[in-house]
């Protein structure tokens, strides 16, 4: 197959990858659940390309993100649920429905009026969705405290928004020390889960610990995303120092002992503390 600008070619390639026997073994064993983390990762990489102003990289990353849509659509088609055309039909219908000031008779609206109209249309769509799924909730979605928190947000940001929403109705700790005590409690539960050797339980308890850590950041007035980005940058910076230090000895990380790398890590940390104190 040759590369192409036609979306039909991409759909053909995806179908070939998912064809039993002749397709790709890795692609064939994937499910919606196993692909979902890659979908989130690709969305972040699109945002990263935008932040760096790299248009060529943005083109490539948008292609990777489009592949995720095609992958999910192909698996849904195999189940007989919907296909890529159905995805396109759904989003085109939604855009036309939500823009009556462009595609309908409603004209000459101000930006604020457009925003208000958008909210009204979305609310109506939610009511229709709730009517189609009456058993999903005991309370109407619009009356629920957490209904305003979008389900599609990244987990870290959504945890923060869920906690803020609950706090607004009084479901919150009054003292940051109580949050610290909860962290100790959750850490102990992670230790107990690890001892069981059950991955599902370990995952559950680590999730709880993450959630409480977000709560700690909120009570401390710290944005957890910013804090984690800082920690990531710090790790990258210090690990680069370790690699550079090993390179002067003619070694790569794989050829070094943990003790060697840990000593260089401590050195990097000590140098940063000196620099900050200067």
Image (cartoon, helix red, strand yellow):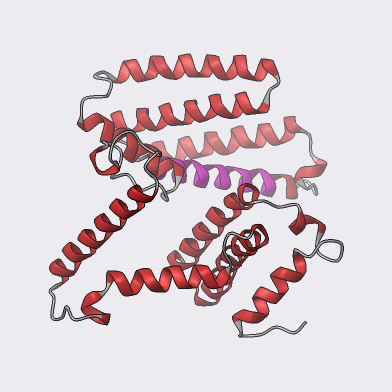
Image height of 4 relative to 165, above or below: below
Residue beneath the point at 76% across and 66% down: 17
Q: Is residue 229 visible?
A: yes
Q: Is residue 251 magenta?
A: no
> Where in the figure is residue 176, as x and y percent of width and height?
30, 21
Q: In which image quadrant can residue 162 be found?
A: top left
Q: Is residue 53 visible?
A: no
Residue beneath the point at 39% across and 37% down: 159
Depth order, front residue of 132/30 = 132
> Where in the figure is residue 215, as x and y percent of width and height?
36, 29
Q: Is residue 257 left or right of residue 183?
A: right
Q: Which residues are magenta?
A: 225-244
> Where in the figure is residue 253, as x and y percent of width and height?
75, 44
Depth order, front residue of 3/184 = 3
Residue beneath the point at 58% across and 59% down: 81
Image height of 260 relative to 234, above or below: above
Image height of 99 relative to 21, above or below: below
């Amino acid at each position: 197959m040759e590369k192409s600008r036609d979306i039909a070619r991409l759909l053909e390639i995806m179908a070939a990858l998912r064809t039993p026997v002749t397709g790709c073994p890795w692609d064939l064993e994937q499910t919606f659940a196993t692909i979902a983390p890659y979908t989130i990762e690709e969305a972040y990489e699109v945002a990263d390309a935008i932040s760096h102003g790299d248009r060529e990289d943005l083109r490539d990353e948008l292609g990777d993100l489009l592949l995720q849509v095609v992958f999910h659509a192909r698996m849904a088609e195999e189940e007989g649920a919907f296909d890529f055309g159905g995805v396109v039909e759904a989003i085109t219908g939604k855009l036309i429905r939500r823009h009556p000031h462009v595609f309908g008779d409603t004209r000459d609206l101000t930006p604020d009026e457009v925003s208000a109209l958008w909210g009204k249309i979305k609310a109506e769509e939610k009511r229709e969705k709730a009517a189609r799924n009456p058993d999903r909730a005991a309370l109407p979605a619009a009356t629920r405290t957490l209904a305003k928190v979008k389900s599609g947000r990244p987990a870290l940001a959504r945890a923060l928004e869920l906690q803020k929403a609950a706090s607004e109705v009084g479901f919150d700790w009054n003292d940051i020390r109580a949050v610290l005590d909860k962290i100790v409690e959750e850490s102990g539960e992670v230790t107990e889960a690890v001892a069981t050797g059950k991955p599902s339980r370990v995952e559950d308890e680590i999730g709880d610990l993450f959630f409480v850590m977000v709560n700690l950041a909120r009570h401390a007035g710290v944005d957890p995303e910013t804090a984690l980005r800082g920690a990531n940058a710090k790790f990258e910076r210090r690990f680069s120092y370790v690699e550079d230090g090993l390179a002067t000895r003619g070694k790569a990380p794989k050829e070094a002992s943990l003790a060697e790398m840990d000593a260089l890590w401590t050195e990097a940390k000590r140098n940063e503390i000196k620099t900050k104190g200067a």
